[in-house]
Structure formats: C-alpha cells, structure tokens
Amino acid sequence: MPTLFKNGRVTIPKKVRDEAGIHPGDTVEVRATASGGAYVEKVSTHSVRSRNAALSKRRSKR
C-alpha cells in the first residue's frame, strides 16, 4: 500500500502505472473526491501544451 511522505509525494504502484500507461516524466492531475479520496489521471501532452499556452498568455497580459 502506498505511503504519503512528509513532502507530499506518494509512489504509485508499478502495476497501476502500467495499467494507466503512466511513465516517468508524464504529467498527472490529482483531484480530491467528494468522498474524501483522491483521483489521479494521466494528462495528455496536448492538454499540457494547451494549458501552458493559456497560462503564458495570461502572464503576458499582466
């Protein structure tokens, strides 16, 4: 069973990473659930690029 470390890191078990297609360097999104759990989802490269572009535009407007 994974353990949460003091710095907020948690190791996702290899079996779960393999089944979810998560690899070192991938971006994942972590969200809290209404029942008090957590949901981890691999974010597509396209989504990351779109988000970074939007953030870059927002910064340049300030």
Image (spheres, rainbow, N blue to C red):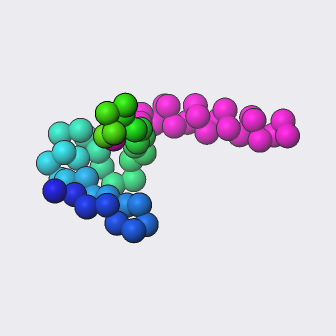
* Percent of width and height locating residue 50: 58, 31
The answer to whether residue 40 shows anywhere in this view is: no
* Percent of width and height locating residue 26: 39, 47
SS assignment for the magenta stretch, majority: helix
Q: Residue at x 33, y 39 (%)?
A: 36
* Percent of width and height locating residue 18: 19, 45
Outermost residue on the front side: it is 35
Does residue 53 appear left or right of residue 42 in this picture?
Answer: right
Reply above or below: 40 against 8: above
Magenta span includes 7: no
* Percent of width and height locating residue 47: 50, 31
Reply above or below: 27 against 44: below
The residue range painted magenta reads 38-62
Q: Quadrant of the C terminus?
A: top right
Q: Residue at x 31, y 33 (%)?
A: 35
* Nearer to us in this view, 26 or 39: 39
* Nearer to us in this view, 8 or 19: 8
Tally the marks. 0
Q: Residue at x 16, y 56 (%)?
A: 1
Outermost residue on the right side: it is 62
Residue 3: image quadrant is bottom left
Residue 39: image quadrant is top left
Reply above or below: 60 against 7: above
Does residue 12 appear left or right of residue 24 in this picture?
Answer: left
Does residue 15 appear left or right of residue 44 in this picture?
Answer: left
* Nearer to us in this view, 30 or 25: 30
* Nearer to us in this view, 27 or 3: 3
Does residue 12 appear left or right of residue 1 in this picture?
Answer: right
Q: Residue at x 29, y 45 (%)?
A: 22
The answer to whether residue 50 shows anywhere in this view is: yes
